[in-house]
Structures are given as C-alpha cells and as structure tokens.
Image (spheres, rainbow, N blue to C red):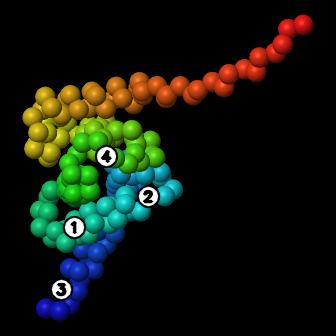
Amino acid sequence: MRERHASQGARRAREFEAFVAGAAGRLLHAATLLTAEPPGANPRARHLTALALAHTYAAWDRLHGEDPYDRTRQYLAARFAREAWHRHGGLGRSRRRPSGPLGGLAPQERLVLVLRLYEGVAEEQTAALLGLPVERVRTICDRAVAALLHPPAAPARPVAPEAKTATP
C-alpha cells in the first residue's frame, strides 16, 4: 500500500514538474504584464505565479482531464483581480503608475488585454471569468488597445525664454 502511494506521489510530482517546465515562463510573463512590473524586477508577478502554481499543484489529482494551464491562468487572473481590488479599492485607475509596458493602463484594462490578446482567451470566456457582460469586455479591450496605440501626449515642457540681445 505504501509503495503504491509512493509511486503515485512520484508520478504526480513528475507530471507537475513537466507542466511547470512548459508553462511557468508563459505564466510569469502574463503575470508580469498584469502587474505592469519591468521584466527584470517583478516580485509581485513572481509571487502571483507561485501562488497560482501552488493552487494548481494542490488540485492536481482533481483535474480529471481539465487543462492545468487554463486552471492556473484562471486562478492567476482571479488572484490579480482580488489583489487589485484590495490594493486600489477596485480595478479602476490606481494612484501610482507602474513602470512596465502596460503601466499606463488601469488594472482591469491590463487584465482584459492580457487575457484577450496575450493569452487568446475568447471574449465570452473572459466575460465569464470576470463576471462582466461580453460587451463590457469588448469595450474595455478596445479602450486599452487604443490607449496603447495612441498614448496621451506628454505635457509640453516650458521653453526658457531666450535671452534678448541688444541690437546695435
């Protein structure tokens, strides 16, 4: 009996290690985009990815044919949304602008954009995952893409007045 449990545990560990080897990089990149941290300095994204992978490992034996990547991505997105809600009082604009490539977007815009464009999740699935109408997901995605393609102009710098020269 112990040998059977040990072999099942070893098989489970091997399967999960293979999953992590194939999926961890992409999940970390998605988390880095969500948190809008620079790729080289992304402690929140690493923490978010570790939590999502730990959650998947805990449920590994109960997946029963379900896609582990999809399950992990769902947890990652839900955890990010929950943290953004607690950190910023919602998924709207935050007071502090992150410095990453998507730093100019609100957390909800980043979440929808990453799920739709980076991860390729359908509008209907994104809407169901976030508890939003499909039309709202489409609007948020369109607004986020427009903000990335046409960022607001930087405020004009005041030009120092040129020194007047006396004319002879």
Q: Which residue is mark 3?
A: 5
Which residue type does callout 3 highlight?
His
Mark 3 or mark 2: whose residue is earlier in sequence: 3
The answer to whether mark 3 and mark 1 are in CB contact below 8 A is no
Decide if residue 70 is in sight here: no
**Considering only vertical position in the picture, is 58 above or below 82?**
below
- Lower position in the chain sequence, tag 3 or tag 1: 3
Name the side, left or right, on which 57 lies relative to 46: left
Label disc, if present, on residue 112 of the rendered structure? none
Per the image, the residue denoted by label 2 is 42
Q: CA distance from mark 2 to mark 4?
A: 18 Å
Residue 79, picture quadrant: bottom left
Mark-to-mark CA distance, 2 and 1? 20 Å
Q: Amino acid at mark 4?
A: Ser
Name the residue beneath numbered marker 1. 55
Upstream in sequence: badge 3 or badge 4 = 3
